[in-house]
Image (spheres, grey):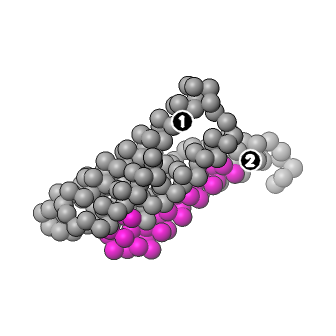
Amino acid sequence: MSMVFAGIGAAVLVAVDAPWSPVLFAACIQMRLLCNLLDGMVALEGGKKSALGSLYNEIPDRLADSVIIVAVGYAVHVSWLGWCGALLAALTAYIRVLGGALGLPQDFRGPMAKPHRMALLTVGSLLAAPERALWGTRYALLAALALLVVGSLVTCATRTRAMSRALIAKSPAIR
């Protein structure tokens, strides 16, 4: 269901030229996160957590994030920035999972982990609605997307540095 809400939100933001479309987009972002939260809670609380479930949880998450972020790029008419943001968002998750594959605890630190990215885009969208109605501009969304890109770069660097330190501490001979 998170993919459905991501798709609906993206379509509305890009295809509907109305002041309320960013508000619906923000609601879809939150519904996408709620679906993700409920899915995880059901798996954990119901004792149904499995490696296969994790696989089918992670892949739709990355796709939904990408759909949302790319849509913002198209909505502000800077599509390359949306694609860059989606790539960096996926890279933050890749670095987290790579740490886990190397035997380290998965690192969810930010400053632009998934909850932070989605909160930033939600706020940017809610600010975009009155901006769009009053002036017809899209600077709030553009600023949110630019911050997402910069923050994701910092997150990638922060996680990589922490992973490097942890690997060296685990085995000083790998320097």
Name the image quarter holding the C terminus: bottom right
Residue pictured at 54% horizontal, 35% vertical? 40
Given the image, on which type of amino acid does mark 2 rest? Ala
Residue reaching furthest right? 173
Residue 158 visible in the picture:
no
> In the picture provided, is 152 more to the left or to the right than 127?
right
Q: Residue at x 48, y 69 (%)?
A: 83
Give residue 125's quadrant in the image. bottom left
Q: Is residue 73 visible?
A: yes
Towards the viewer: 117 or 3: 3
**Range covered by the magenta-colored residues:** 71-98
Nearest the viewer among 59 and 122 is 59
Residue 40 is marked as 1
Find disc 2 in the rendering and name its residue: 101
Left or right: where does residue 67 sit relative to residue 46? left
Name the disc covering residue 62, or none: none
Q: Position of residue 169 (x, y in %)?
A: 77, 43
Q: Residue 84, how many percent across, how many down? A: 49, 68
To which quarter of the image does residue 131 belong? Answer: bottom left
